[in-house]
């Protein structure tokens, strides 16, 4: 990353921003030197900004009526006046159609909700609700028995000056109280004390007598759908006429608004302006090409970044190989690495699928994740978003593409480990003779190379593999912490990394001898040397952060770090627990088939499938979260991923490139 500084005449401010926006690679920061003030728009520019914002608002409202998601396209090439002239009739027409459609949809919804009640109530009033002398209070209750307290309340309030009639409906009872108009409020109060309210019809049916509501609903039930179909045809016609132009207008208007608003980041004097931004080194040619169009009227310079003093200000763009880049999703939402620090993407790309495969280890689950990978990838190719119903979250096509690639690696790893474990939807393939225990007493197509369900035979090997992965991860994390501390001249971080790394090496060497009884002289030397380095590091940290931090916290933390290595055993334990549950599901199904024959087979299949689905729903979240948690917490915390926050690289560019 390099710093870009540009200066030029004030009259070229918008042209400069237009060229940089076209280049699309400069992250612009506010420039506030003491000698210059903030760039402010002229009254004419303020007016133009509001007019472009009005165009954005108008296009958004029109697209909402058309039911179309805004998509950036080639921008409209004309002037502001031409844009306003072109969009005005479309916006006006869309507003009219939108109001008509909303009114008709509301009317049809009211008929659907209240039509039956209106017909039943109208049959009880016999037109009395239109009399100038009498008043009618319509209401609904759930059961006929609920009318008994209503009659008692009306007797108490009105004696015999009322008439109560009712008629059953599908799930409710329609009822009306007929009174003299002077007794209307007393009747309503009596109902209100029982928690009953007068039924009031919404929208166009409000304030109409019940008889007229029923008649109008019957008429509109036939006519309104035809009117709505006509309006929808007009909306579709408007879309065919205007959609391409609306997308172009929206792209141009949003670009213009963005340029006007970004102008406030410039510094300005009476006659000149200055701009500061950040450019990735490999994008410099694009900037130079863009600025060459103003070469004789502006000056600019690129400056190398001072990593030690400017790291907090420099935006970060992650550079990873294509196969690893999708895994940026798994840490990007937590934190952006500070400029000059460590990017954990490749480590996550290597170890997350591996951990996931060890945990899941099932060919059937691999096929399921493979299908999900295909689904997300296919939607991305079609340019369609993916809606997650339970949370209402909408995943953009670009994100779906990355999710598809991550899921593909997960599926491949789960399939490989599933073949080693001999698992296909649990022990289904073993029951069918596809996999068989390699013990000399069974036969089938493929021997089970690593049967994790036989814990007595394989648990030691798998636990050791998990511990070795934990040792590798934590050694790497503390080595990184020491290196980054040295690189950034942070003595405390450097010595923390050295101390914990040396201490863990000593503890691991001691644990190896304790458990195996081998290598005692060498491992004893490693233990003593590691603890000696740890003590030296502890004193160095104490000098930097204070005696309590160094002398008290670090020894306790060293034991905690050793425990974090043990936490990697969860990769084996969580996977084994899921495998046992899947085995139970298969055993239950096949046991029914053996005892009850063909019918039992059908029942067993259904029971096994239901159990498998429930087990998957219960365990799948843990199977995904446990591996990534180890990379976030045990690895990320120990090298300092969460210690410092970086700034994401947000280049100033056209909306069609975003």
Image (cartoon, rainbow, N blue to C red):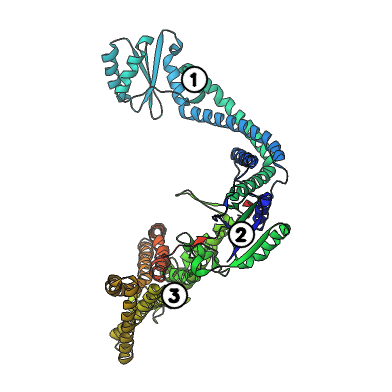
Q: Is mark 3 on a helix, strand or loop?
A: helix
Q: In this view, does 49 lie above or below 287?
A: above
In the image, 644 versus 366, the foreground residue is: 644
Q: What element carries label 2?
A: loop
Mark 1 vs mark 2, CA separation in Å: 64 Å
Decide which of tag 2 and tag 3 comes sooner along the chain: 2
Q: Mark 1 points at which residue?
A: 213
Mark 1 vs mark 3, CA separation in Å: 77 Å
Which residue occupies 50% across, 25% down?
203
Q: Name the residue under label 2.
A: 26
Residue 230 position within the rendered picture, expressed as x and y whole percent measured from the top left: 64, 31
- Other residues around mark 1 within 10 Å, as few (<14) / some (14–19) / many (≥20): many
- Give yes or no for contact between labels 1 and 3 (Cβ–Cβ under 8 Å): no
Decide which of tag 1 and tag 2 comes sooner along the chain: 2
Q: Nearer the viewer, mark 1 or mark 2?
A: 2
Decide which of tag 1 and tag 3 comes sooner along the chain: 1
**Which residue is most to the top?**
133
- Give yes or no for contact between labels 2 and 3 (Cβ–Cβ under 8 Å): no
Residue 458 in sight here: no
Residue 581 horizontal side relative to residue 70, left or right? left
In the image, 420 versus 271, the foreground residue is: 271
Q: What element carries label 1?
A: helix
Q: Name the residue under label 3.
A: 480
């Amino acid at each position: 990353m390099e710093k870009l500084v540009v200066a030029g005449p004030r009259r070229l401010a918008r042209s400069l921003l237009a060229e940089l926006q076209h280049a699309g690679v400069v992250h612009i920061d506010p420039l506030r030197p003491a000698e210059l003030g903030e760039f402010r728009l002229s009254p004419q520019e303020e007016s133009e900004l509001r007019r472009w914002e009005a165009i954005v608002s108008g296009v958004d409202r029109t697209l909402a009526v058309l039911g179309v998601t805004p998509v950036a396209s080639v921008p409209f090439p004309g002037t502001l006046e031409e844009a306003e002239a072109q969009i005005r009739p479309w916006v006006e027409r869309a507003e009219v159609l939108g109001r008509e459609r909303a009114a008709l949809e509301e009317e049809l919804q009211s008929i659907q909700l209240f039509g039956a009640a209106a017909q039943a109530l109208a049959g009880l009033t016999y037109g009395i609700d239109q009399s100038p002398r009498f008043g009618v209070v319509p209401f609904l209750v759930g059961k006929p028995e609920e009318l008994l307290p209503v009659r008692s309340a009306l007797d108490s309030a009105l004696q015999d000056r009322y008439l109560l009639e009712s008629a059953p409906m599908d799930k409710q009872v329609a009822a009306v109280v007929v009174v003299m108009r002077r007794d209307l409020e007393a009747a309503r109060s009596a109902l209100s004390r029982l928690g009953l309210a007068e039924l009031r019809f919404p929208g166009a049916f409000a304030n109409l007598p019940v008889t007229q509501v029923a008649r109008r609903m019957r008429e509109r039930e036939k006519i309104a759908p035809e009117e709505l179909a006509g309006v929808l045809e007009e909306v579709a016609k408007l879309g065919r006429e205007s959609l391409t132009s609306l997308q172009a207008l929206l792209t141009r208007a949003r670009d213009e608004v963005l340029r006007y608003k970004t102008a406030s980041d410039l510094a300005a004097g009476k006659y000149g302006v200055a701009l500061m931004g950040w450019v990735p080194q490999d994008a410099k040619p694009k900037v130079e090409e863009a600025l060459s169009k103003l070469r004789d009227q502006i000056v600019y310079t690129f400056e190398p970044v001072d990593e030690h003093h400017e790291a907090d200000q420099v935006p970060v763009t992650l550079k990873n190989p294509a196969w690893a880049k999708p895994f940026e999703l798994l840490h990007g939402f937590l934190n952006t690495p500070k400029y000059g620090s460590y990017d954990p993407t490749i480590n996550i790309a290597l170890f997350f699928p591996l951990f996931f495969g060890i945990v899941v280890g099932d060919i059937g689950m691999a096929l399921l994740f493979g299908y999900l990978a295909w689904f997300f990838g296919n939607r991305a190719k079609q340019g369609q978003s993916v809606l997650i119903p339970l949370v209402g979250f909408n995943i953009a096509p670009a994100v779906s593409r990355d999710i598809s690639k991550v899921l593909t690696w997960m599926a491949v790893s789960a399939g490989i480990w599933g073949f080693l474990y001999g698992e296909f939807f649990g022990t289904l393939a073993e029951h069918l003779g596809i996999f068989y225990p390699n013990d000399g007493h069974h036969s089938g197509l493929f021997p089970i190379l690593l049967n994790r369900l036989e814990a007595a035979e394989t648990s030691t090997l798998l636990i050791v593999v998990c511990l070795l992965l934990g040792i590798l991860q934590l050694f790497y994390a503390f080595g990184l912490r020491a290196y980054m501390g040295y690189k950034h001249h942070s003595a405390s971080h450097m010595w923390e990394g050295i101390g914990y790394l040396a201490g863990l090496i000593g503890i691991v060497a001691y644990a190896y001898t304790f458990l195996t009884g081998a290598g005692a002289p060498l491992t004893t030397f490693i233990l003593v040397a590691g603890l000696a380095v740890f003590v030296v590091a502890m004193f160095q940290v104490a000098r930097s952060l204070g005696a309590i931090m160094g002398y008290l916290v670090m020894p306790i933390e060293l034991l905690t770090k050793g425990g974090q290595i043990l936490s990697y055993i969860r990769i084996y334990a969580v996977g084994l627990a899921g495998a046992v549950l899947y085995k139970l599901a298969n055993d239950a199904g096949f046991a029914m088939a053996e005892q009850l024959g063909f019918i039992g087979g059908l029942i067993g299949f259904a029971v096994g499938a239901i159990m498998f689905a429930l087990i998957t729903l219960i365990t799948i979240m843990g199977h995904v979260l446990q591996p990534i948690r180890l990379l976030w917490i045990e690895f990320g915390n120990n090298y300092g991923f969460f210690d410092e926050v970086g700034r994401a690289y947000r280049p100033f560019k056209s909306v069609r490139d975003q």
